[in-house]
Amino acid sequence: MSEYDVAVSFAEEQRSAVEDVVEAFRQRGLTVLHGPEQTHEWWAHKDGGDLPDARVRFFVPFVSEVDEFTTAALRAVKAGDEHVLPVLLGDVAVPPELLHPHVAYLRGTVQRPDQLTDALVGRIETAEAAGWQRASITDVVTGVKDVAPAEEEPEPVVPATFSRYAEQDATLRYLAEQFAAALPRLTARGFVGTAHVGETRIAVRVERAGDTVYALDIQRGGIGGDETVNFVVGRPDGAALTNGWARPVYDTGVGAAVLEVHDFSVLGGGGAPHAYRREELFTALWERIDAVLASTVG
């Protein structure tokens, strides 16, 4: 049985370009199983008895577009087949569900066969150092074709137990606790900070020599609905328009509740709504207060 470093597969339109790459491989001393007929379609339609009697270190399909055969090859890599090494050509876009997060795929252009050769030689040296054995090309290719598509994960949904009002309560409690712990630290900077916590409002005030230099009311409900948290800045009497508001939402992407913050000026203003965890929202509010107080001192 013949032994090779690599066996290559290519799309019909890449035929002549891949021949140049194969020649660069051979000039570096690599042994290559390559024939002008060995396109993706050729490999895909061969059964075990028709495949070459050979053992290879890597089976290398050149991926210029994600067709049926290269999809199967990428799926095999994701399933753990160490003998399949796709080369992604140019800016070909591979669907994320076909990529393994811990596998660094070879990527290059057929116009720079030297770069692809260097990368491939590095992979072969790594495989040899790790003691990887060559595999039958029949086993590798039939294995590629036998890997079943992964079952689609169910569409994430919002849990039936998610409650905007429960999240609103939790957010108000958390912000009250954090401000109560943080405000006393302002004394070291020459300010006095207090937080009055009521049923529907947290009143944060910062004073200097008896003058209010910063006021923030965090209110239950208001603009956006009674399940939201509203922020009023700069008017101790509360007679001001909302400077921003947050609605509890469930982020199916991360599988957790977050706050969709609409910032008019409470955090600096502008931009599209942004998702914050409770911890991130307090940090953003405190950083804004810190910036305001710094400008007051200046």
Image (cartoon, grey):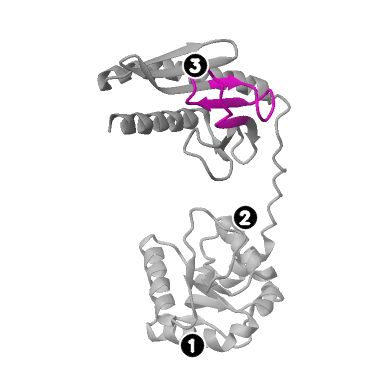
Residue 203: image x %, image y %? Answer: 49, 16
Q: On the picture, is 221 further left or further right than 24?
A: right
Do callouts 3 and 2 mark residues in contact (Cβ within 8 Å)?
no
Q: Residue at x 69, y 45 (%)?
A: 153
Q: Indicate which label's residue lies in the foreground, 3 or 1.
A: 3
SS assignment at label 1: helix
Instruction: Please state which of residues 285 and 209 is positioned toward the viewer in this rendering.
Output: 209
SS assignment at label 2: helix
Q: Indicate which label's residue lies in the foreground, 3 or 2.
A: 3
Residue count near mark 3 (Cα–Cα under 10 Å), binned few <14, some 14–19, many ≥20:
many
Q: Residue at x 53, y 43 (%)?
A: 270
Name which quarter of the figure residue 170 lies in: top right
Q: Quick check: is 238 in the magenta stretch?
A: yes
Q: Residue at x 70, y 30 (%)?
A: 159
What distance separates the C-alpha of mark 3 from that of mark 2?
A: 48 Å
Badge number at residue 20: 1
Q: Is residue 54 above or below residue 125?
A: below
Residue 110: image x %, image y %? Answer: 49, 81
Residue 232: image x %, image y %? Answer: 53, 26
Question: Sequence order check: which comes first, mark 3 or mark 1?
Answer: 1
What distance separates the C-alpha of mark 3 from that of mark 1?
A: 73 Å
Q: Indicate which label's residue lies in the foreground, 1 or 2.
A: 2
Badge number at residue 204: none
Q: On the picture, is 237 further left or further right than 73?
A: left
Q: Which residue is mark 2?
A: 97
SS assignment at label 3: strand
Do callouts 3 and 1 mark residues in contact (Cβ within 8 Å)?
no
The residue stretch that appears in magenta? 218-247
Q: Amino acid at mark 2?
A: Glu
